[in-house]
Image (cartoon, rainbow, N blue to C red):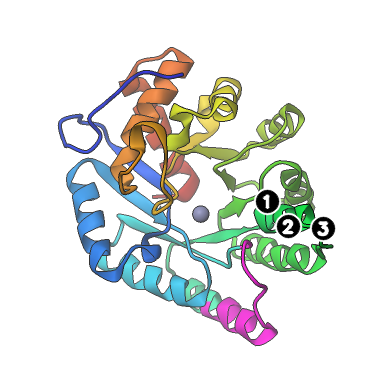
Amino acid sequence: MPNSNVNYSSGALKMACIDAHLHVDMYAEEERDVLLEEAFRNGVEAVVAVSMHLTSSKTNDALARKYEGRLHPAYGFHPEQELPLDVELGQLLSWIRERYAEGQAFAIGEVGLPYYKRTELEAEGFLFNEKPYLSLLETFVQLAAELDRPIVLHAVYEDADKVCDLLQTYNIRRAHFHWFKGSEATLERMIEAGYYVSITPDVAYEKEIIELVKYYPIQLLMVETDGPWLFEGRYSGQQTVPCMVKQVIADIAFIKGIEISDAATILLHNTKRFYGI
Ligand SMILES: [Zn+2]
């Protein structure tokens, strides 16, 4: 297990970093500004704010205008929920196109496949029809290709292969698989395609994630919190905040056997290059 404690909650560790996947709109409304301002004060250069649906996208759009250059929005429909009605999807897609017409910088996300929803239902003996989720994802992949925007993906284990097929059909180069877990064969395929993977604080205690960090080239890694998702181990009982990515960087440096400052520089550069921040 990595053992490289850094005081991520203070500004003491001067390390510029980006939280590449944060659900800022899922924090209580009165907490959002405090959370972001504290992060920016403590060396977090920017956060990538992913969306669940249209309402969430609108919140992130407003925050992106308020924190220009520091909050980079991603607009989409999260797969681990009920499918949108056609009219809702239509509204979301035309709203995203309006942001594009306005010239706003944004990514497409969070989109993907409902791995946890599907496997939980299947474990209870239900049949799960994945087809409409695949076609919803295809709509967003097509949009990312058409608007030439990076795409943020929720696709783990065997779902990642289905997503890679779709990305390759539409010649998508800029794909970010957040909090990825999967087989070595899938990882190999993703490395080959130049797809990015982001690491969360659970690299401190999840063997599978430690192995992934060993395996995946650092040039294709980013760091994230997926906040407000809560973590265990040294993070037990703590609210998830963007500054925690500093500890993730330290853990990655430890696993890769490189200096923390070198890891920080590479990871920051990767995220900026990928998102155009
Ligand atoms: Zn997420």
Cα separation between marks 1 and 2: 25 Å
Residue type for callout 3: Gly
Residue 164 is labelled as none
Cα separation between marks 2 and 3: 11 Å
Which structural element holds mark 3? loop
Sequence order check: which comes first, mark 3 or mark 1?
3
Residue at point 20%, 55% (across, down): 37
Residue 118 is labelled as 2
Q: Say left or right for 210 vs 234.
A: right
Evaluate if marks 3 and 1 touch, with contact meaning CB atoms under 8 Å apart: no
Residue at point 60%, 40% (across, down): 180
Residue at point 63%, 79% (across, down): 89
Q: Say left or right for 34 vs 155.
A: left
Using the rendered image of the protein, determine whether residue 212 is visible from the camera's viewpoint: yes
Q: Quadrant of residue 94?
A: bottom right
Q: Position of residue 76 (x, y in %)?
A: 56, 67
Which structural element holds mark 1? loop
User: Is 93 inside the magenta-drawn segment?
Assistant: yes
Q: Residue furthest front?
A: 124
- The mark tally for this picture is 3
Q: Which residue is mark 3?
A: 125
Q: Position of residue 82 (x, y in %)?
A: 65, 72
Residue type for callout 1: Ile
Q: Which class describes the residues within 10 Å of circle 2: few (<14), some (14-19), or many (20+)?
A: some
Q: Which class describes the residues within 10 Å of circle 3: few (<14), some (14-19), or many (20+)?
A: few
Q: Which residue is mark 1?
A: 172
Highlighted range, magenta: 79-95
Sequence order check: which comes first, mark 2 or mark 3?
2
Q: Position of residue 102 (x, y in %)?
A: 44, 75
Cα separation between marks 3 and 1: 35 Å
Q: Position of residue 33 (x, y in %)?
A: 23, 62
